[in-house]
Amino acid sequence: MAMAGVLSDVKIRDRIVTFLETQGRSAPLEALGREVFRFWNPPVAFLREMLCRLFADDPHLVLREDGWVELRSEEGEDRALEESEFIVLDVETTGLHPTEDRLIEIAAFRVAGGGGRLRLQEELVTLVNPGRPLPPTIVRLTGITPEMVARAPRFEEILEELVAFLGPRVLVAHNARFDLAFLNAELQRARHKRLGHPRLCTLALSRRLFPELPNHQLPTVARYMGIEMEQWHRARSDAWATARLFLRLLDPLAERGVRTLSDALCFQASRRSRR
């Protein structure tokens, strides 16, 4: 059964969180078994044992004594978006599979209040030595060469700086599931830990805000919102464009009543835009 291993744990948690956000943050264990794991007749004892293992170090996911699974709010989720702090990030990788492939570049921007509005503040950008050859397709796609990453630090060497930069802030990415799956996989290998931060996905938000777009790839949505991109598939350029996009989404979100982090988390998990 594909429920063991580093990536599977991360994927399972993401599926559970998404499901609970659509259910008002709590649901019976049996409903979770049917909707998340597609069990026709959910094996409650097995699910309870698995969730106890997955939730052991996660104070936000709780299996209650009454058999309900609850997603508890992060401190600060009721704070207005303009009063929160965010880390907008992007990664480049050797491929598409977090358990098999590795990071080759990370870029992150801190977005925080200043003068009554959110602004881009400091940044962290670095290439990462993956410790393996770069596939030719990745070199062509990103322009990152073997010589460039050969001189770069390993993930373990930037881990402390990265964790300090992320702090307790809300994480934002375009297709956040992809970027955070890779970060979680690297953290699992290095520290046997994973990120517990709240996360917002500009891909999910744009799908719900702008269903009329032909696709919701970053260049398409950026162009729609009047944001020019220097290049695509380099972490700094993509993270910068995502940060600008996130800031420009705040007004259309507010028009739909999305004003707090909690509102945004629920909105991005909803199946249809609130028009």
Image (cartoon, rainbow, N blue to C red):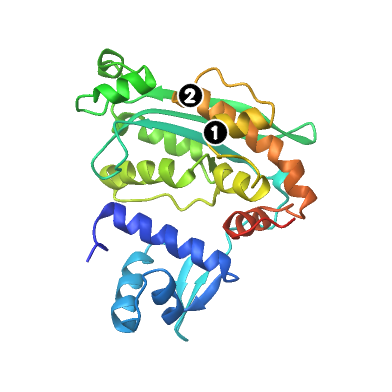
Q: Give whichever of 138, 51 is nearer the camera.
A: 138
- Whether residue 16 sits left or right of residue 215 in the image: it is left
Q: Which residue is mark 1?
A: 218
Q: Earlier in the sequence, mark 1 or mark 2?
A: 1
Q: Is residue 39 above or below residue 140?
A: below
Marks 1 & 2, CB-CB < 8 Å contact: yes
Residue 212 is situated, as x and y percent measured from the top left of the image, at: 66, 44
Residue 93 is situated, as x and y percent measured from the top left of the image, at: 34, 32
Residue drawn where x is 64% and y is 56% of the image: 267
Amino acid type for the residue under numbered disc 2: Trp
Residue 22 is situated, as x and y percent measured from the top left of the image, at: 57, 66
Residue 68 is situated, as x and y percent measured from the top left of the image, at: 48, 80
Residue 179 is at least partly visible in this image: yes
Classify mark 1: helix, strand or loop. Answer: helix
Residue 169 is at least partly visible in this image: no
Classify mark 2: helix, strand or loop. Answer: loop
Which image quarter holds the C terminus?
bottom right
Q: Which residue is mark 2?
A: 232
Q: Quadrant of residue 21?
A: bottom right
Mark 1 vs mark 2, CA separation in Å: 8 Å
Which image quarter holds the N terminus?
bottom left
Q: Pointer 1: residues within 10 angstroms few (<14), some, or many (20+)?
A: many
